[in-house]
Amino acid sequence: MRFKKVSSLVALIVTLFSTATFAQRTDSIPIRHNVSLNQAHKGTLEIDSLLLDSYTRLPTNVRQFYLEARSIFEGNGADFTDERIVAAAAKNGIPLMSGPMLGDIKENGVSVWLRTASKLPIEIDVTDLARMKVKVYTSNPRVAGQVERVVLSDLSPQSKYSYSVKVQGSEVAEGTFQTTSKIGETSELRLAFASDFHKIGLHNPNLMDAILKRNPIAMLLLGDLAVDDRDTNLSMHRADYLLRDLSQPWKKLSANVSLYAAWDDHDYLNNDLSGLPEGVSNEDREALRKLWSENWNNPENDTPGIYFNTRIGAVEVIMLDTRSFRENDRRGEYNSYLGAAQLKWLKDVLAKSTAPYKLITSGTMWSDYISDGKDSWGTWDTLAREEIYQLIETENIPGVLLLSGDRHGARSFTIPRNSGFEFYEFGPASLGGVPGPEAIAKDSSKQLFGYLGLGLKAFGEFTFTMEGEAPQVTFRLIDEYGNIMEEHEISYDQLIPQKR
Ligand SMILES: [Fe+2]
């Protein structure tokens, strides 16, 4: 490990004396309304309305649509296809309730997720920016307000495209994307990742611009994102998704970078809740999983629940469901955390993957350094965790990186093994700038860096290279103004368990 930009000592000093040493861009947009984490958890109409205008004022018609739809969602039982919500969209001149959200980026295509407010045909014109050739894709929604996914297929690898979404000939949205290189071909690949928008960060234009300026091909979102503490009230889950989808900064992010998401406690039910707590039925859990899948644009998979794996160029992305399979009455026992089926699936994916790099995400911590592993692997299922670690070591599975969310702030650790191998864990839980636990572990000898949560609006980024003599991955922690706070290089050799 080489510490390129910020030494661990400096990181500790920065941790102690805030992050104000980094420059704020002069073109950044100042915040107008500070909404606290506790307010976001409450999510009253007044609080959510403040979020809408927390940086820039929403156009009046968009705001009015939100208020009218929200009042219908508050009444419970409604979904986006409810005729009153469709009518409110029409009345306020809103052709697109949600999206576009890009997802499932491949060498030859991408998925565009959106929710139009009518049954009018959708046309997406895609321009190959190198050759200026245009392809047209169409979709015919059967129901107004229902999610559509349009797959833009037959595109060229590693190519830049722009697209325009049209309804009745009028452009309603636009964006850009870049396809991945062909599997097996080596090229640099950049992925962003982080967690904990807690609704608040979804409205931050500075953060979204900072992410887009880095030009990641995709972004992984690791929980506590758009829905906050709505328990089993499905209509209020939808109200929170609408709050997300009407945010202009969010729209800009989701239209220009492919997103992959997994949930944590606040998206699923409420603080530290998991599995089936008292009052939550199996049907509720199934409905929550279905609603989640509808409102994100994750790759299709045949797993039960919301976990999935997918290949993005040289990277196998494995996003776990570390919430809904927990078995509360078996806490601390083997298989109480992921459940038997998900654990078996994970082991199969790891064993079979031919990708040089494998990212495994967990909504909560892999390691136990912070909060003594509270509500995480360390207090739920150390046996299954050990089994995963051992599988990677004994099968000599290279290129595994562990990602986690939940503990607000941003930290990274190594996890040493008896064999001498070390796993790396990165946890930038800093999309919302909300307070959290200690920045630095009691034993900081395995810590690469640590920052407190309050005020830290930042994301993580991996740049993977497989070219040349020394393939490596570079991690960066980048703040909302584009300042690189941390830069750490890990050589590929360091990610091979049985390196001789
Ligand atoms: Fe959180």
Image (tube, rainbow, N blue to C red):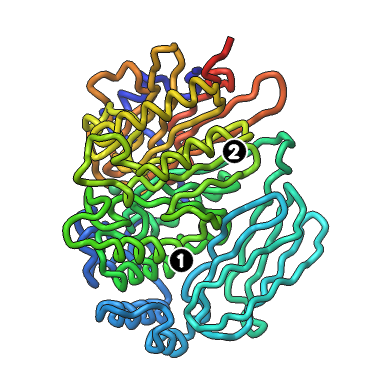
140 or 127, nearer to the observer: 140
Nearer the observer, 487 or 188: 188
Image point 53% across, 62% down: which residue? 101
- Which of 336/463 is in front? 336
Q: Which residue is under mark 1? A: 294
| Residue 383 position in % (x across, y down) | 32, 29
| Labels 1 and 2 touching (C-beta < 8 A) | no
Q: Position of residue 42 (x, y in %)?
A: 20, 62
Direction from residue 246 to residue 161 in the image, left or right: right
Between residue 456 and residue 310, name the one nearer to us: 310
Q: Secondary structure at mark 2?
A: strand
Residue 312: percent from left, percent from top: 61, 44
Q: Is residue 292 above or below residue 66?
A: above
Q: In the image, is 378 to the left or to the right of 400?
A: left
Badge 2 local density, few (<14 within 10 Å), some, or many (20+)?
A: many
Residue 429 seen: no
Q: Residue at x 32, y 52 (%)?
A: 324
Q: Is residue 187 left or right of residue 252?
A: right
Residue 315's mark? Answer: 2
